[in-house]
Image (cartoon, rainbow, N blue to C red):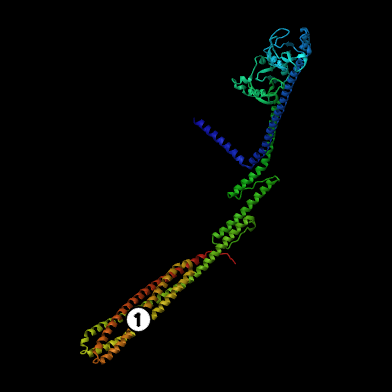
């Protein structure tokens, strides 16, 4: 079983190999040329053979149809002529006066009949009286159709009928006997003549178109009335009726139906397993008779078949010769093309060193081989040059040039152009990176210095704010003390008289304190101017940082955010300073008002005796003003604390900006070091 399985597997592999070889052969140029040329030869030759055979067969059939139809018409005309001759003879006897005369003896009448029978090679003749009885034998023929027709004044030819005289099938030609022998007078009897019993069959036998052909005749019912085979006539063969029980006769029956319809034509049918052709035509001046000529088609197609065989043989020989010529031609064309195609296929796989096929012919295949060699050589030089150019650029050398510019021809020139564009593009890009790195380094250094200066300024701002905060706190304590004193003074208003001196001293102290408050207010104004200068400097530093960040591009995006925060803080500082200014101005105004009140109070104390009520009122006003000053000083304290927070935030941002600028500067230096590794081409 294993051996059989191996044999079966080997057989399958062999079949698959053969099929694959056939497929590959059909896919080659040699195979395509062979199949195409053979197709161009085989198809026309085959088509020519088929057309020739079809035309020959059609011509034979057309000629046969015409000849058969013509023969059928000729046979019909002959039968018509024969019957017309016999009818004329019978009509001539019917107009013989002696046959119509009653005084003529039977011998005379018999003599006339016998003379005509003998002269026209007839079998016999007879005369019937008005009752259909023979005047010679006394036999009654009144039941015969030909008698009835003749008595109506018309001559006729009967169908083959069994003779009452001989008992044989006979055709009777009858004509009326006219009184006095004058046509158109009264019919006094009937004369009939009987030709040879087989005269119709003899006509049919004489009518033949081939060795196996024959003719026959049917009546208006389709019954055979004449045939070379007398048995068919005797048994009154009728194919139309027989076809009702025998389906093989339907084709013949259909043709005979056309015959009894009086048509002329030709058709084919099968009879006894043999295909036959039949031409038919009506017999004019008959009682619906029609004649048919039939013969096997094989009697006429033998020459056509021989012609077809010869045509096929010629086509086969021409195809064999064409096969040899085409194979040789395809080999001369396909082999060089295949060798060149295989070499180009190896070239497509990267083989630049295999041998180039040698073609000795002097036609286009040699040109193809030479072109293949040029392609391999030029492509090899181009690939080597590309490898050199890209290899140099791979080791950071962009100052490199092609060593095989002449090989870049046609569309290959675009490859060299593309490599040059890549080289120039990379060189330009790296050059721009170097310039950008220098600018980033310079900008980061400047930004670091600005950040350092900003940090120092912020530190100074913080120290100034702390001093300002201490001063404001002292001022607030003094204001609060004044407030308490004013309240105490108000409570002791009733004892003002007794404590006038002590109040005077207090007023002096208050005047001095107001002077100090006034001095402190002036110092606060100076501090505010310093804060405004710091805020302006912070805004300027923020603007410079934003400009430098914009120059740094993507690398300076973080600095842009820091610069924006610094600018925002500077804006807040400016707003806080403005609020502080307004508060201090209000405080100074109140201090000035306090000084004025103190002076007035001092004057009032000098004149305390003049109006103690006015002193009490003045003390109350001082208490109210001191309370307002205390509130204003608390607001100033809060504003200064906010300024302190902003200054501390600015200081931290400035330190962060300085650190980031230093890091950016270090990265710019590292980027420059990396660019220095590339040898760039001179783009000028």
Residue 55 picture quarter? top right
- Would you say 123 lies left or right of 657 here? right
Compared with 346, 449 (above or below) is below
Q: Percent position (x, y) of residue 265?
A: 69, 26
One can see residue 274 in this view: no
Residue 104 picture quarter? top right
Compared with 217, 511 (above or below) is below
Q: Is mark 1 on a helix, strand or loop?
A: helix
Compared with 567, 294 (above or below) is above
- Would you say 70 lies left or right of 454 here? right
Q: Residue sitting at 70 percent across and 27 percent down? A: 65
Tell which residue pokes out farthest to the front in this image: 186
Q: Percent position (x, y) of residue 142?
A: 68, 12
Residue 302 picture quarter? top right
Q: Residue sitting at 33 percent across and 82 percent down? A: 587
Looking at this view, is 224 or 584 the one in front?
224
Looking at this view, is 248 or 453 the one in front?
248
Q: Percent position (x, y) of residue 452?
A: 42, 74
Q: Quarter of the image containing the C terminus?
A: bottom right
Q: Name the residue under label 1.
A: 584
């Amino acid at each position: 079983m294993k051996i059989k399985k191996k044999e079966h597997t080997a057989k399958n592999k062999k079949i698959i190999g053969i099929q694959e070889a056939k497929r590959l052969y059909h896919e080659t140029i040699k195979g395509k040329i062979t199949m195409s040329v053979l197709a161009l030869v085989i198809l026309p030759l085959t088509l020519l053979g088929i057309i020739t055979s079809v035309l020959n067969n059609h011509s034979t059939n057309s000629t046969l149809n015409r000849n058969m139809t013509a023969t059928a018409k000729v046979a019909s005309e002959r039968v018509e002529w024969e019957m017309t001759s016999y009818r004329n003879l019978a009509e001539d006897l019917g107009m013989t006066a002696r046959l119509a005369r009653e005084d003529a003896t039977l011998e005379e009448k018999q003599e006339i009949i016998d003379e005509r029978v003998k002269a026209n090679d007839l079998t016999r003749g007879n005369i019937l009286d008005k009752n259909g009885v023979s005047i010679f034998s006394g036999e009654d023929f009144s039941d015969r159709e030909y008698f009835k027709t003749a008595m109506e004044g018309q001559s006729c030819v009967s169908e083959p009928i069994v003779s009452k005289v001989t008992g044989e099938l006979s055709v009777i030609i009858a004509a009326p006997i006219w009184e006095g022998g004058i046509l158109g007078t009264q019919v006094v009897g009937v004369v009939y003549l009987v030709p040879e019993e087989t005269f119709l069959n003899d006509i049919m036998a004489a009518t033949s178109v081939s060795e196996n052909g024959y003719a026959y005749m049917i009546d208006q019912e389709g019954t055979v009335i004449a045939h070379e085979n007398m048995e068919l006539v005797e048994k009154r063969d009728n194919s139309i009726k027989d076809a009702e029980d025998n389906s093989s006769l339907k084709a013949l029956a259909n043709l005979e139906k056309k015959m009894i319809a009086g048509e002329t034509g030709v058709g084919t049918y099968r009879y006894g397993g043999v295909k036959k052709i039949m031409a038919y035509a009506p017999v004019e001046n008959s009682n619906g008779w029609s004649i048919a000529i039939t013969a096997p088609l094989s009697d006429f197609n033998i020459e056509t078949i021989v012609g077809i065989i010869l045509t096929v043989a010629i086509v086969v020989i021409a195809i064999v010769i064409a096969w040899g010529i085409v194979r040789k031609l395809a080999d001369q064309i396909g082999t060089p093309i295949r060798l060149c195609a295989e070499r180009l296929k190896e070239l497509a796989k990267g083989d630049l060193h295999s041998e180039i096929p040698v073609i000795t012919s002097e036609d286009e295949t040699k040109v193809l081989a030479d072109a293949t060699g040029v392609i391999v050589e030029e492509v090899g030089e181009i690939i080597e040059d590309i490898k050199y150019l890209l290899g140099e650029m791979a080791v950071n050398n962009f100052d490199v040039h092609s060593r095989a510019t002449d090989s870049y021809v046609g569309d290959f020139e675009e490859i060299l152009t593309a490599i040059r564009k890549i080289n120039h593009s990379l060189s330009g890009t790296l050059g721009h990176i170097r310039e950008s790195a220098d600018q980033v380094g310079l900008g980061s250094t400047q930004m670091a210095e600005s950040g350092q200066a900003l940090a120092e300024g912020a530190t100074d701002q913080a120290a100034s704010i702390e001093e300002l905060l201490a001063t404001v706190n002292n001022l607030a304590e003094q204001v609060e003390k004044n407030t308490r004193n004013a309240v105490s003074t108000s409570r002791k208003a009733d004892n003002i008289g007794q404590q006038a001196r002590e109040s005077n001293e207090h007023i002096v102290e208050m005047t001095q304190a107001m002077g100090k408050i006034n001095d402190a207010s002036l110092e606060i104004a100076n501090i505010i101017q310093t804060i405004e200068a710091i805020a302006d400097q912070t805004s300027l530093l923020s603007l410079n940082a934003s400009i430098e960040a914009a120059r740094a591009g993507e690398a300076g995006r973080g600095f842009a955010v820091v610069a924006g925060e610094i600018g925002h803080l500077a804006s807040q500082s400016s707003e806080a300073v403005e609020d502080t200014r307004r508060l201090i101005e209000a405080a100074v105004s109140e201090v000035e008002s306090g000084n004025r009140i103190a002076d007035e109070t001092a004057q009032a104390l000098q004149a305390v005796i003049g109006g103690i009520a006015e002193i009490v009122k003045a003390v109350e006003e001082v208490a109210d003003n001191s309370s307002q000053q205390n509130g204003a000083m608390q607001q100033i304290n809060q504003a200064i604390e906010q300024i302190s927070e902003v200054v501390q935030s600015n200081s931290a941002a400035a330190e962060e900006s300085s650190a980031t600028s230093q890091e950016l500067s270090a990265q710019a230096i590292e980027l420059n070091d990396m660019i220095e590794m590339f040898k760039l081409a001179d783009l000028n």
